[in-house]
Image (cartoon, rainbow, N blue to C red):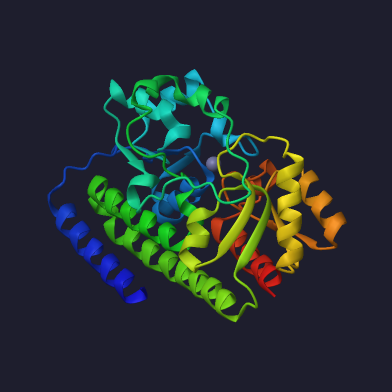
Amino acid sequence: MKKILCIFILSALLLGLAACGEAEPALPRDGKPVIVTTLFPAYDFARQIAGERAEVILLVPPGAEAHSFEPTARDMIRIQESSLFFCNGGESEAWVEELLEDQQIETLRMLDCVDALEEETVEGMQAVPEHAHEEHDHAHEEHEEEGPEYDEHVWTSPVNAEKICVALCERLCQMDPEGADYYRANLARYCAELEVLDAAFRQTVEQGQRRTLVFADRFPVRYFVEEYGLRYYAAFPGCADDTEPSARTVAFLIDKVRDEQIPAVFVIEFSNEKMADVICEDTGCGKLRFHSCHTVSAEDLENGVTYLELMWENVAALKEALN
Ligand SMILES: [Zn+2]
């Protein structure tokens, strides 16, 4: 896998090199280019790769519910004036596709950088109520029966994070050939760090006593468990509205914790943790946090928290949950 990735990156770099020779610089010559991002992972990846050559803006406010985000008029102007709009794509960002229907905006979607997985409902999971999708869907109702619904949380696998950063670097090189060496150096450094993280997750799973995670919460980390061969039970799919779990869902998870002697259940960031507390009280298991990195708090954002920092906390939590 690692070798394939290395070859992938190398060829991406070479391709980028070729493209950089020909492309017209698309960035403003005076002042820094502006990269407008929707979600925290895109924001952090853009900071890591573009570094000091660009100003990076995060649209979805810290701590906000990313799935129901509606851009303000000011956000729209920022997107239109940006050098690059680096978004996630997918159903929660249906407004993006609406915007791009009649505007030419340089855009990169994280979902397009990876092999997307379909949303999944596993045993015991409470299905998303129909209305949960309605507010994002109005523009796409006519397409609703076409094609699968993709899970949007692609960045939760560090391997995907690397693919996304490679694609971002390529795009930046095309747009700003003068900065190509700088972007590539940043990419190489950052990918090396992602690979150390990836190795830590792999080792944690290999050395773990079990392979099953229980999320007493939504489950926005499907790409992560697929990457590392983990099984999971969860109360709700990743993009479900915050819904009260049914007694049956809670009972199902309690049974799983008991049957498989799960040492700790997971909550995700900004969870009210009520369901987890009920399960912990009933079974005596522990409670751990898994950062999906979907959104961060205002305080963390201000303190410059990174995807890598949060994911390393996940390594530590995973160690506890698997042993
Ligand atoms: Zn989500």
- Split into 4 quadrants, where in the image is the C terminus? bottom right
Residue furthest to the bottom: 207
Indicate whether 13 appears above or below 238: below
Direction from residue 174 to residue 225 in the image, left or right: right
Q: Residue at x 77, y 51 (%)?
A: 276
Quadrant hosting ligand 1 = top right
Indicate whether 146 appears above or below 126: above
Indicate whether 115 appears above or below 9: above
Kindly indicate the quadrant of the structure image that contains residue 128. top right
- Split into 4 quadrants, where in the image is the N terminus? bottom left
Q: Residue at x 62, y 77 (%)?
A: 208
Res 195 seen here: yes
Q: Whole-percent x and y of residue 126?
A: 63, 41
Res 288 seen here: no
Q: Whole-percent x and y of residue 65?
A: 61, 34
- Nearest the viewer among 3 and 41 is 3
How many circles with numbers are drawn on the protein?
Answer: 0
Direction from residue 25 to residue 252 in the image, left or right: right
Kindly indicate the quadrant of the structure image that contains residue 138. top left
Residue furthest to the left: 22
Q: Residue at x 60, y 81 (%)?
A: 207
Indicate whether 14 appears above or below 38: below
- Nearest the viewer among 191 and 280 is 280
Q: Whole-percent x and y of residue 270?
A: 70, 43
- Nearest the viewer among 265 and 89 is 265
